[in-house]
Image: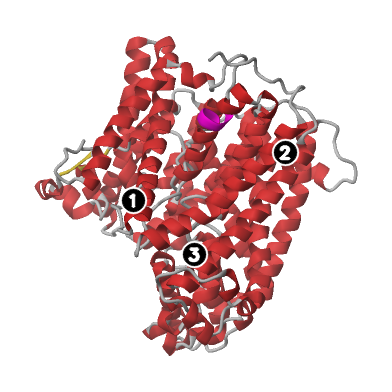
Amino acid sequence: MKSPPETTQSATSRAALMLAGVVALLGVLFIGFFPHWYEVVVFSIPAPQIAVNALGPLVFFLIIALVAGVNPILRAWAPRLSFGSRELFWIVSVWLLAGVISYTQLTTPALSVAGNTFNPVSGQTMSKRVEFHSLLNSNLFLPADAAKDYYYGTGNGLHRLSFADVPWREWRQPLLFWIPLLLCVVALSLSLVRIVHRQWSKHELLSFPIADVTQSLLNLEPGRAFPALCYNKIFWGGFGLIGFICLVNGLNLWFPKMIVVPLDWAYFDLIKQFPFLNDYCGREAYSLFRGMAYPFIVALAVLLPAEISLTCWLGWVLMVFGTGFYFLSTGETIGATETSQIQAGMYVAMLVTIAFIGRREYLAVGRHAFRLRLPEEPQLRRSVVACRVFIVSFAALTGLLMVAGLPWPVALVAVACFTLVLLLAARMTAEIGLPWLPHLSGLMQGLPVKILGAAALGPQALAMLTVLGVAVGSDMTNSIVAQATTCAKLDDNQSKRRRELGLRLWLGIGIGVALLATVVATLSNNYSFGARREEKIVANLRSSVEQTSSQINQLRAEGITGNSADLARVKSEPKFWRFFLYGAVIVGGCALLRLRFTWWPFHPLPLLLFGSWTLSRLYFSFLIGWLIKLALVKIAGGKVFAASKPFFIGIIVGQIFMATLWMFVGAIYYLATGTQPPAVNLFM
C-alpha cells in the first residue's frame, strides 16, 4: 500500500499533539512498572541489567516499536493523527528521562536507602559497635520495625498486595524529604546539560554518538511511512548479522545443546608465562589475556573519531604496563586507593580543560544570568535560563543536605563533587557515547572524604554522607544527565518554532508520572514480595555503612569522640595529593598537546577510565572497532566509510531489539507457565 504524503509540521493537528502526549505517558507508565515486575515477579533474584546504561534497551525497544510499527500504521490509516519529527522528539525525550527515573539509577536506590537503613538485618558488626544509626536523622528513614516489614514483605510472597495495603502513612515523612531531593537532582542535571550544550554542540562540534543513533530512527522523509534508515539495505545487513548472532545465542540459553556464537576468549593461565605482567603490573594485567567483543561497542568505536577509540584501547594497555614500570621505579604498587586518587586528579583536570575551552561561552552565560534582562539570541537565552535554574537547584540540594544533618561546608563540597560527576558523565555521553559509566559511581561521598579527610567531616557527617551518596550517586551506569545530553542534541534537529513551553510541560508531566509510577511500583512490589530481592542495592548500602563505620571507629580510637565536623582537622588521605597530581598531569598534559599539535594521537577524555573495570571489559571491543575504521578509511576511502555507517547503526539497533525481544519472550513464557525463564544478560 502506498504511503500518503508526510503530514507537515504546519499541518500537524492538535489531535496528533494530544495523542503524542497520551502515548508518551502510557510509555512512561510501562517503563515505570514493567522492569520492577519483570525482576521481582518473574525472577526470584533480580535479573541483571534491563536498563542499566544510556542505551537502555527497554526504552530504545519502545522507540523502535513506535517509529517502525505504530507511526507507520497511523500514517497509512489516520494521517491527521500521525506523528511528525516534533511529536516523536517529545515522546522520545520523555521516555529516555523516564527510563532513568524509573529504574535502579535514581528513585529505587533512594527508596531502598529510606526503607532499609534502619533495618536490623542491614546492621553489621562494626556498624553496631559504633552505633551508626544514632548518627543519622531518623525522620528521613523508616523506623526499625517498619523497615523489617518492608524488607521481608507483609504479603504471602505469592500475590501482589493491593494499593491500599501499602502502609503509606509510614512513608509520608520519609517521602517528604526524598522526593524533593530527587527532583533537585533532576533539575540540577537538566539545567547543567543545557548550560554546556551550545558550547559542545555548536562550537566544539562533539560527536554525540548516542544521539546520532537515536536521530537516525526519527528521520522521516515525505511520502514514506518508515524512517529513512529502514530503506537502507546496508542498515539491514548490520541488523541481520547481529540479529542472527543474538537469535542463536538466545536459543542456546533455552536449549543448551544449541550451538553458540562465541564473542569472547580468555587465556588467563598465559599470564604466568610473562613474569613482568604477573609480578608488577597489578590486578588488571589479566585483562590483556581476555577479549570480549561487545558488538554494539565495536560498532560505536567505528563511528567515533579515531583518536578516541585509539585512546580507549591503547591507553588501557599503556596503563597496565605503566603500573609495572612505576613499581620497578619506586617499589610501590598502585592499588585501588591510589587508582581512585589518580582518577580524582584526572577528573579535576578534565573540569579545568572543559572550562578553559568554553570559557567565553560560560562567562557570557554567567554574566547574563545575574542580569534582569534576558539576551535576545534564543539559544543563549535558553542557556541563561538554565543557569538560573542550576543555581537555584544547586542551592536547594545543598539546603536539603543540611536538613539531613550535614554542616553547610560539607554539604557544599558534596554537591560540588556530585555536580563534577554529572558534568563528566555528560561529557562522556556527548563525546564518547560510552553507555556504561560505573566508575563514576560513589564519588558524591568518596571525593569529600579524600579531599577533606574523615577527621574534618566527623562521624555524623560521614554517616549521613554515606547513605545520601548511596541513594543518589551509587549507580552511574545510567543517569539523568546522560539522557538529557542525548535529548539536547536531538532538540538541535527540531524546527525553531516556539515550542519550548510545550516541551517543558510534557517533560515535567512525564518526570512526575515516572517518579510517581516508580514509587508506587517499588513499594507495592517490596511489601508484596520483600525488599530483600533488591539484593544488589541493599548489599551496596550494607557494605558502604560498614566501611564508614570502620572509619568512624578509627576516628574514635584516635581520640576524635565528637560527632560534629571540624574543618580545622582537614587532612587528606595519605599520598592523596601526590597521586592526584599524577592524574592531573596526565590528563592536563594530554589535553594541552591535543590543543597545540594536530598530530597528537591521544584524546584526554578516555583517560578518565584509567583503572576502571569498565575499560578492562571494553578495551578489546574498542581495538576491533578502531582496526575496522582504520581499514575502511585507509583502504576503501572516506566515501566508503561514510556509506558503511548505516551498517554499524544496524548492529547497535539490532542488538537492542533482539536482546529486549528475548526479554519479552521470557516474560510471556512466565505468564503462560509460571516458570522462571532463562535470564537474558542485556549488554553487560
Mark 2 sits on what residue? 18
Residues 454 and 390: in front is: 390
From the image, tell me which residue sits under label 1: 669
Q: Farthest residue toward the left?
A: 273
Relative horizontal placement of residue 590, taking residue 201 as reference (left or right): left
Q: Relative to 311, does residue 143 appear above or below in the rendering?
A: below
The residue beneath circle 3 is 446
Q: Does the magenta stretch include residue 342?
A: no
Marks 1 and 2 in Cβ contact (< 8 Å): no
Q: Residue at x 72, y 38 (%)?
A: 18
Q: Nearer the viewer, mark 1 or mark 2?
A: 1
User: Measuring 51% from the left and 39% from the top, which residue is drawn there?
Assistant: 62
Q: Would residue 387 be found to the left or right of residue 232 on screen?
A: right
| Residue kind at label 2, given as amino acid type | Met
Report whether 10 appears left or right of 607. right
Rendered view: 591 above or below 255: above
Quarter where residue 201 is shown: top right
Residue 224 versus residue 299: which sits nearer the camera? Answer: 224
Image coordinates for residue 94, horizontal then vertical, percent? 62, 44
Q: In the rendering, at what x and y percent does residue 424 appear?
A: 54, 47
Residue located 86% across and 32% down the image: 376
**How many numbered marks, from 0 up?**
3
Sequence-wise, which precedes: disc 3 or disc 2? 2
Going by the numbered disc 3, the residue's amino acid type is Gly
CA gap, disc 1 and disc 2: 35 Å
Magenta region:
67-71
Side of 549 where 88 appears, left or right: right
Secondary structure type for disc 1: helix
Is the residue marked by circle 3 packed among few (<14), some (14-19), or many (20+) residues within 10 Å? some
In the depicted view, which residue is nearer to us: 81 or 169? 81
Give the mark nearest the N terminus, 1 or 2.
2
Is tag 3's residue or tag 1's residue first in the polypeptide sequence? 3
